[in-house]
Image: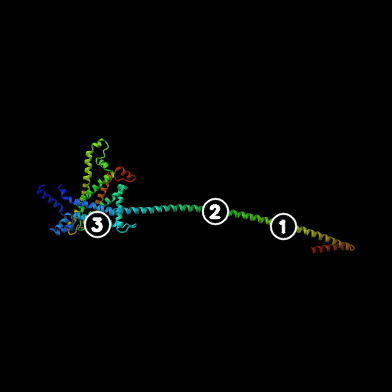
Amino acid sequence: MSEAAEGVHAAVAHAAHHEAHELPNLITVLRQLFPDASWAKFLHQWENVLFALTAAILISITAIRAARKQRLVPEGIENFSEAVVEGLEAFVKGILGEQGQKYVPYLGTLFIYILLMNWSGLLPLFKSPTSSWGTTLAVALATMVYVQYTGIREQGLGRYLKHIAGNPSNLFGLALIPLMLVINLTVEFLAVPLSLSLRLFANVSSEDRLLYKFAELNVLFKGLPFFFQLFANVLAIAFSVVQAFVFMLLSTVYISLILPHENHEHEQEGRPALHVH
Amino acid sequence: MEFFKANIQLGEVFVQLIAFVIVFWALKLLAWKPLLKGLAARREHIQGQLDAIEQSKKEIGGLKSEYAAHLQKIEEEARLKIQEAVREGRQISREIQDKARAESQAVFEKAKTNLDLETAKARITLRREIADLAVSVSERILKEKMSDSSKQQEKILEIIDDLEKSL
């Protein structure tokens, strides 16, 4: 790539990255106050990571504190954390059956982490790290690796590879192996992370843009559309939950699909199935 | 590709990935495991308590039916004893009646015998007295033989009056 092309790319990237499409956060304010400071530039470059880490630390401290105080009759935050954990456990087991218990920590962490990152954009001087594709892609890649690892662990490498090859059972199936390999590899390793990450990223960044535009309108029309912004905030709160839930639901379904089918079907007997085969 | 390059910073993705994995492992070890274990223990405890309650209910149900059967048995026994007592009472009353009847019969018989004896005694006494009277009358008639017949008749009537007064 030539220097000119690199320059253009850098300019486009910079413009895309720094275009004002979100409400200002603490780091953008610092960046504006200290435009030449290298630390402000560094913080601005890693702002998504910093806000994501803030959410992660908050979740960790709350969850670990709640987990330490285990009593027969829970009180305060224990009640809340146990209600959340029990709800998530019931949801995951509802889809995966009793064997879903071991996937609750991953799927639960995923839900709470994404939800808190989505909501953090609603707080003044904060931003949603999930409005950046980098963040959502990282979480989606982690999910993809986790799902494939679960497939190998639960099915064994041979059956996993057979699953990737489309489970050929006759000559026709064998002939279709190259095609099935391409389709399955594309779906499992490309479509899954892309669909998961883009859906979340697009929704959350759209919410943030909407809130920004309403704030802009409020400035232009002296607070006249305030109630519209309030309504948008309520919608953003609800949609953040929905997006986190959809991410977790799809991850659960991917795990369900990669698990050995006969066991899974056996466990599903006697209750309504939520299969997406 | 420009879109991808503009929106994805590989360094950021990598750091976010590592951060998420660390958070997941930390939470799994320090929060999820104790919380799920605690919930499972509490569920087990509550289930144990519920089972114990159910068992107690069953035991109470068993005791209740046992108690009802026992009560039924006691009532049956009481009824039988009352019936037995009534039967015995009737028997005793019948015996008392029979005994009383026999005693009264004996008293009656005795009284009758006494009466017969007294009657026989009275008859003997009367016979003797009549004999004595007849002798006495005969004596007086013989003494008055010399007087007239009207006088004799008056005398006999007088003697009869005396006899009636003495009786």
For disc 2, the marked residue is B79
Closest to the observer: A138 or B111? A138
Q: Amino acid at mark 2?
A: Arg
Q: Are marks 1 and 2 on the same chain?
A: yes
Q: Are marks 3 and 1 in contact (CB under 8 Å)?
A: no
Q: The C terminus of chain A is located in which quarter?
A: top left
Residue visible at 79% across and 58% down? B124
Q: Position of residue A123 (x, y in %)?
A: 22, 57
Image point 81% across, 60% down: which residue?
B128
Q: Classify residue A77 by image quadrant.
A: bottom left
Q: Residue A179's x, y, as percent? A: 22, 39
**Residue where numbered disc 1 is placed:** B110
Residue B34 in the image: state x and y as whole percent. Answer: 30, 54
Where is residue A237, by image quadrant?
A: bottom left
Under circle 3, the secondary element is helix
Q: Is residue B115 above or below residue A163?
A: below
10 Å crowding of disc 3: few (<14), some (14-19), many (20+): few
Numbered disc 1: secondary structure: helix
Q: CA distance from mark 2 to mark 3?
A: 79 Å
The residue wearing badge 3 is A58
Residue at horizontal 61 percent and vertical 54 percent from the top: B90
Identity, as a three-letter code, of the amino acid under mark 3:
Leu
* Crowd tier of the residue under label 1, counting other residues whose Cα lies within 10 Å: few below 14, some 14–19, many 20 or above: few
Task: Give the chain of mark 1.
Answer: B
**CA–CA distance between discs 3 and 1?**
123 Å
Residue kind at label 1, given as amino acid type: Lys
Q: Chain of mark 2?
A: B
